[in-house]
Image (cartoon, rainbow, N blue to C red):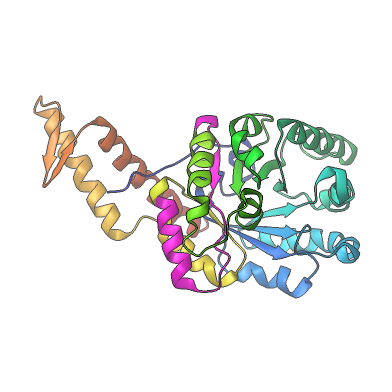
Amino acid sequence: MPQEVVGPTHPVSQRDGRRRPALRRSWLFVPGGDRAALLGAAQCGADALIQELEDFTPPNLRPQARAMAAEAFSAWRAAGIVACVRINPLEGDGLADLAGVIAGRPDAVHLPKVAEPAQITALDAEITRHELRLGLAAGAIEIVPNIETARGIMQTYAIATASPRVSAVLCSTEDLAEDLGAPRSRAATELAYARQRLHLEARAARVVSIDCPYTFADVEGCEADTRYGRQLGYAAKSAVDPAHVAVINAVLTPSDGDIAEAGEIVAAFEAARAAGLDRARLGDFLIEVPFYLAAKRLLSRAAELSGASAGLP
């Protein structure tokens, strides 16, 4: 049975009813200036949607894209989806992006090309300034650093702990491969160490790790890539193609078989402990405390995801 990762509990999520970070399996980037795509994305099944104002939005379209933000965020929240935006770096159009969308109250702001903790503290300060200006709830907007360079990977822990607003960190695909000087492949061998290290440092920082998007069109490849990420420990994955959302959700949701097996493990261990034994045996499994705790976490996650899908708080 694969170990289940639950992740941290973000205080904001418990106050306002949004799906908490550990339950956001699929994060879909949506072209920021395409109104039809923005509104249509509410039907794709993603747990979190990201209005993409950086690479997916040419500079000349960014002003009108910012003007669409409030409508998109409102539609997404009405559908039970976490509403996010990816702005440009602050030294570029990021300040204008943030000023243009903040009144729409994004649940989370993604910042690209993060390589230094100071970039996160600067963004935190800007968000705080706008919250005060607009009378928004202090600290309610989360930050999700997007790690896209070797320098960023090396500093993931420092970046993730640079602000209490950071609820997750996201691993890049294309930009990271380019920075590594590595040919891009479907197998993503070139990104293996970076994906492992980002997840490890995110776990050490007690924030959610979001796996890199599968940037080829085939759904079968996306499923295989998601399963590989799950083996590394990821419980969330980003996407750039709406067709990939369903398979990401399916892979990152405990199956009926997983749930049944976890229930058997919990029952066997608790029966062994009741009999005064230090561990239990179930088939080939020698069930010790860590394996028992992983099974209990999987059952808890399955119940929470079921409740979230049913629209429960």
- Is residue 249 visible in the rendered structure shown here? yes
Q: In the rendered image of this protein, does residue 172 appear above or below residue 56?
A: above
**Front-most of residues 122 and 47:** 122
Q: Quadrant of residue 216?
A: bottom right
Q: Residue at x 18, y 34 (%)?
A: 270
- How many badges with numbers are in the image? 0
Q: Is residue 199 left or right of residue 303?
A: right
Q: Residue at x 74, y 59 (%)?
A: 52
Q: Is residue 286 left or right of residue 246?
A: left
Pinpoint residue 99: horizontal percent, then vertical percent. 88, 48
Q: Is residue 271 left or right of residue 54?
A: left
Pinpoint residue 186: horizontal percent, then vertical percent. 50, 65
The reply to whether the magenta stretch includes residue 218 is yes
Q: In the rendered image of this protein, does residue 199 appear above or below residue 225?
A: above
Pinpoint residue 244: horizontal percent, then vertical percent. 53, 68
Q: Residue at x 19, y 37 (%)?
A: 287
Q: Residue at x 79, y 63 (%)?
A: 71
Pinpoint residue 134: horizontal percent, then vertical percent. 88, 41
**Front-most of residues 276 and 176:** 176
Q: Which residues are magenta?
A: 204-230
The reply to whether the magenta stretch includes residue 22 is no
Q: In the rendered image of this protein, does residue 13 appear above or below residue 30?
A: above
Q: Quadrant of residue 66?
A: bottom right
**Front-most of residues 40 and 152:** 152
Q: Quadrant of residue 46?
A: bottom right
Single out the residue that lies furthest toward the left: 275
- Is residue 312 visible in the rendered structure shown here? no
**Front-most of residues 126 and 184:** 184
